[in-house]
Amino acid sequence: MSVMDIFETMEYGPAPEASSLALNWIQARQPFQLFINNQWVKPLQEQYFESSNPATSKALTQIASADAADVDAAVAAARQAFPSWSKTPGHGRARYMYALARHIQKHARLLAVLESLDNGKTIRETRDIDIPLVARHFYYHAGWAQLMESELADYQPVGVVGQIIPWNFPLLMLAWKIAPALAMGNTVVLKPARYTSLSALKFAEIVQEVGLPAGVINIVTGEASKAGDALVKHPDVNKIAFTGSTDVGRSIRRTTAGSGKKLSLELGGKSPFIVFDDADLDSVVEGVVDAIWFNQGQVCCAGSRLLVQENITDRLLSKLRARMENLRIGDPLDKTMDIGALISPAQRDEIAHLVAQGIAEGAEAWQPSSICPASGSFFPPTLLTNVSPASTLAQIEIFGPVLVAMTFRTPAEAIELANNTRYGLAASIWSDNINLALDIAPKVKAGSVWINCTNLFDASCGFGGYRESGYGREGGKEGLYEYLKPAWQSNTAKASLKADNAQEEAMDVQDVSILNEIQEATTEALPAIDRTPKLFIDGKQARPDSGYSLTITSVDGRVLGEVGEGNRKDIRNAVEAAHKASAWATGSAHNRAQILFYLAENLAAREVEFAHRIVAQTGRSYADAFHEVQVSLSRLFSYAAWTDKYEGSVHRPPLRGVTLALKEAIGVIGIACPDEYPLLGFLSLVAPAIAMGNTVVVLPSPGAPLSATDCYQLFETSDIPAGVINIVTGDRESLSQILAEHHDVNAVWYFGSAAGSKSIELASSSNMKRTWVNYGHARHWLDRVQGEGEEFLREATQVKNIWVPFGE
Ligand code: NDP
C-alpha cells in the first residue's frame, strides 16, 4: 500500500491491547475454584465447565461448577459473617469499600482486558466505561456506609443476600449489586453468569487483598439450573437481587412467592429513541451509535426502537447509513474497534433468526458493506425499516446490534408508540426544544429518560424499570432500600399489642362516656332507615354484577347491614374507572393535599358515628374505636402534609448537566385491607396511594367493611374526582387474586394471610407488577412508625431519572 493509498483511505492501523498479562493470570490459576469464606475451595462434586473467548471461540479456562451443597456452604459462610459485619460501624465498612474501590483502580487494566477476553466487548468500552463505573460504585457506596447511621437510622440490613448477574456487563453488574449490599451491612453470595465469571474471580482476589472479613462476599460460579436455582430456593437467604431476562425474572418471582424473601428484578427492555424534527441530526446519529451498537446492542436499556418524526426520516436514515458504513467491527482487543463479538454463537444465531423472521414479516434490512471476521461470534450492525409497531421486531428484545426504525407525526403519536411495549426500562428524547423534551419525559413509561443523550449511568442515579422491565432500583439513595428493612420489623407482634393497649388506656374516658350518652339518646325511638351500600365505582354507587349481597354481623351475631358481593366484572369496571382518572397524577400536589385535608375535615364532622360503627363491627370498646377515628384523622393530615413534600431530587453525576429524579405515581394500585382496624387500616393504605397520584381499587376489611362503605359520602363531599378511589366489597381473597392477575393493574398491596400473600406474589408474575404483602404478619396500625410514613410513600411511587445535559 502506497502513502497515497493510505492518505486516500485514511484507514486505521491496528492498535492491539496486549493480552499476555491477562492470559498468564488465567493460566496461573486454572482451574478456577469457588470463593467461599475468603478461601478458594473445590466444588464438592469436582465438576468444572469451560469458559471461552467469544471473539475467537477458543477455550480460555476451566471454572468450578457449584451445586446445591456448595451453595449451602457459601450461604452458611455469609450467615456466619453477618452478625459481625452488620454491626461493624459504618465508618469501618466505608474503609473497606474505599479500599475495594482503590484496588479496582490499581487493577483496572487487567480487569478491562479480562472482561474483553471473556465477554467479547471492546477494550475501548471496558477500559473507559465498565471499569471506571465499577470503581465509582464502590466510592459512592463507601459514602453511604459512612452516612448510614445518621441518614438511615430507622433501618437495618436484610441479612444474607443472593445475587445473580448476567453476562453483558459482568463486573459492572457485580458492583451494582455488591456495593449497596455491603454498604448497608449485608453479606453476599453472588453467582456470575456462566459465560463470564473471570472478572468476578479477579474481584474475589481483590476481596482477599483488602482483607475483607471472611464470609462477607462469597462467589459461586456455575450453572443456572444448579447454583442459580439453589441460591434462589435457599431458605436462609433473605433477599434475591437478579438481573437478566424477563422470563427468568418471572420464574424467580414464582419460586420465591410467599417465602418472605425481598426481591429486586432488573429485566429486559425495548427502549424507544425518539427524534423530533428540530433535533441536531449529527448528534442524533452519534447518539444512535451509542444507543444500539454500544456493547453490540447487548444492553438491557439499548435504544433499539428508533422513532423518527416523519418529515426528517429520509435525511436522518441516510446520515445513519453513512455512519454505519464507517463502524469498525472486529477484534475486541483492538482499540480502534467500535463493535466487538457477541457473547456466544447461540446468541448470534438467535439474532439472525429474529432478523430473518422480521424480514419475512415485511421489514427491509440494511447492513453496511464492511465484513465481519469469519471466526468468532460477530453480527453486523443492522437497520430495519418498514417495521409495523405490532411486529415481532418492534416488540421482542433482540439483544443484539439491530435497530428498528418507525415514524410518527405528532408528539402524542410519539408517546403512544414509545409506550407501545410491555417493557419500561429507558427512553431517549432528542429535540432542541427543551420545553418539548421535558413535556414528553414524564409521559414515557420508563425508569430512565435521557434527553439529547443516551446510555448514561452513574452510581448516584438510580436505575431500574417500569412494567415488565422489573422493579427495584440500583444506585442512588432509592437503591439502598433494596438492601434494608425497617428496624421495627425485628420487634415482635407482642410489642405491638402492648403499645395498642397503652394508647387505649390513655384515652380520656370521661369524654367518651358523654359521647356515648348522646349517641344512645338520638337512636332510641324509631327504627333505623335502611342503608345498603353498593360498590363504589367511578364516583358512583354501583350494584354488584352478581346481584348478591353479603350480610355483615356484629361479633355477637346481630345483623349490621349488607354489602354487595363483588366479582371479576366489578373489578374490571373498577380498574377501568381507575385508569380513566389518571389525570389525578398530573394535577398539582397542592390540590391533592387540599383534598386530603378536606376529607379529614368531613370525617371529623362524623367522628362519633364512625366510632360507633367500629364498635358495632368489632366489639371493641367505644374508647378504643374513638381513638381509631382520631388516629385516622391524624393519618389523613400526615399524607396531606407529605403530598407536596415527598419530592424527588437533583443528582450530580459527573456530567455537565443535571439528573432529575422524579417520584412518579405507579398507576392503578389494587389494595386489600387488613382485617383489623376497619377504618384506620383502610385510610392508612388509601391515603398514601392517592397522595402520590395513584388511583386505587380497594377491597375493605372482609369482616368489617362498613367503615369503608360509610366513606362513600365523605369522598363525594370532599372533591375527590370520580374514579380515584373505587371500592369493591366481597371476598378479599378471591378479589385480590383477580387484581393480581389483572394486566392493567400496576401494583397490588395485600394485608391478609400468609397463604394469601403467597398467591398474590405468584399471580403478580403474569405482568411483573409490583407487590407489597405482609406474609400474614401483624402491623401496629396505631403506631406512627409502623402505620405511616416513608415506607408507604416509597411503595406508592417509582423513581424516574431524567438526564438533562446542557451547554452550547
Ligand atoms: P438469563 O436471564 O437466562 O441469565 C441471567 C443470569 O441468571 C445468569 O447468571 C444465569 O445463569 C442465571 N439464571 C438463569 N436462569 C436461572 C434460574 N432459573 N434460576 C437462577 N438463575 C438463573 O439470561 P441469558 O444469559 O440466558 O440471556 C438470554 C436473554 O436474556 C438475552 O438474549 C437477553 O434478551 C436477556 N438478557 C437481559 C439482560 C438484562 O440486562 N436485562 C442481561 C442478560 C440477558 P447462567 O449464566 O448459568 O445461565
Image (tube, rainbow, N blue to C red):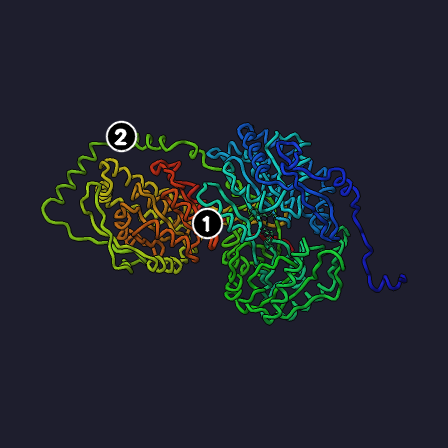
User: How crowded is the residue under tag 2: few (<14 C-alpha within 10 Å), some, or many (20+)?
Assistant: few
Secondary element at tag 1 = strand
Q: Measuring 48% from the left and 33% from the top, which residue is drawn there? A: 153
Q: Is mark 1 within 8 Å of ligand 1?
A: no
Residue kind at label 2, given as amino acid type: Glu
Residue 748 percent coordinates (x, y) = 41, 50
Q: Quarter of the image containing the C terminus?
A: bottom right
**Mark before the other along the chain sequence, 1 or 2:** 2
Image disc number at residue 505 = 2
Query: Where is residue 109 shown, x and y percent of the image?
Result: 74, 42
C-alpha distance separating marks 1 and 2: 39 Å
Amino acid type indicated by mark 1: Arg
Tag 2, which secondary structure? Answer: helix
Q: Is residue 755 above or below residue 183?
A: below
Q: Nearer the viewer, residue 735 or 537?
A: 735
For this orientation, the residue located farthest to the front is 45
Residue at the (58%, 29%) spot, across then down = 91
Q: Which residue is mark 1?
A: 770
Quadrant holding the N terminus: bottom right
